[in-house]
Image (spheres, helix red, strand yellow):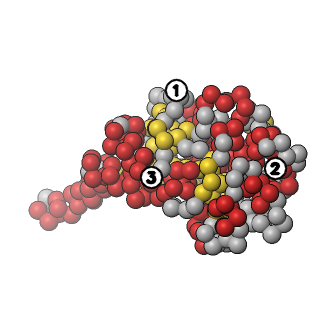
Amino acid sequence: MSVSRRLLLAAPLALAAARHAAAAEAITVAYAGSMGKLMDKGMNPSFAAATGVSVHGIGQGALALAHLITGGAMKPDVFVPVSAGPAKIVEEAGLGVGKAVPVASTSMVLAYSPASKFAAQLKAAKGADWTKIFMNPAFRLGRTDPTVDPQGQYVLFALQLAEAHYKIPGFAQKVAGPMINPAQIFAEPSLLARLEAGQIDATLGYKSAVVSQKLPFIELPDAVNISNPAMKATYAKASLEVKGKTIHPSPLVFYALALKCAANPKAAADYVSFLAGPDGQSIFKRYGYGPGKGPSV
């Protein structure tokens, strides 16, 4: 066989080997859409710099991601959802490697647009004052789809808890309307951008995402913000019917889970360790997240 013939036959093999090597130096991470700025600007570039492994991030509603993963439509290396529910869906399908590790936490806050005509009132609000503003017919609330996104569920949970805490009968229904309200529902990655632009007046959202976007916000009491594990019984009084199931909120914790479908299992495990380790925790803190709370799922 001539040298040129051997080179011609070897070329596809060399190309395949090069593609395999390139794939081995990259991972895909599916994460809760609210984590976009943290992942794009902080976590993923830092992991790549520390390990030489690049990260392709996919941010969407965590429940939707869980169903895409379990249905086989998406095969990321790592899954980073908020709240235990989406992690359990993936684990119960037998797709997780070990347990989902708690890596960060957050709380629900009232974030408002600096461009809103209600901004001055919200800035001056004390205690339950914000609830009166929310019931103004001209007020525009934004939220995400509770059938696919935990954050959309947690907005409704927080409104229910505020109704009980401030003793305002019918408050949640008056503010949110039906669970699926097209006038209020937006895709998670665009929600805070719309808020910043003044297309909506306010939302109830994760403090971590709100701090990352540098938006003004109002802290909510523990009985409403779904962040305190000691108040789990209080939070359990809130509920939604989603796809034939009754669901209740659990404290807002972010989990990281390496997946069995990972093309690069070692890098996937390293990524989870990075999130839980000192470097990852420092980045979480810088972007407004608290430490992981509670046991692995």
Residue 226, placed above or below residue 37: above
What is the number of callouts on the image? Answer: 3
**Point 55% across, 44% down: residue:** 106
Identify the image quadrant of the C terminus: top right
Q: Is mark 1 on a helix, strand or loop?
A: loop
Sequence-wise, the earlier of marks 1 and 2 is 2
Q: Which mark is on residue 51? A: none
**Point 86% across, 55% down: residue:** 174
Judged left or right of residue 50, residue 90 is right
Q: Position of residue 130 (x, y in %)?
A: 73, 56
**Point 27% across, 48% down: residue:** 50
Q: How far apart are marks 3 and 2 (CA)?
A: 30 Å
Query: Residue beneath label 2, please?
Result: 172
Identify the image quadrant of the N terminus: bottom left
Question: In the figure, residue 232 lies in which quadrant?
Answer: top right
Query: Residue beneath label 3, please?
Result: 287
Q: How far apart are marks 1 and 2 (CA)?
A: 31 Å
Query: Residue beneath label 1, please?
Result: 295
Residue 243, placed above or below residue 234: below
Dot 3, how many residues are within 10 Å of its Cα: few (below 14), some (14-19), or many (20+)? many
Question: What amino acid is labelled 2 in the image?
Answer: Ala
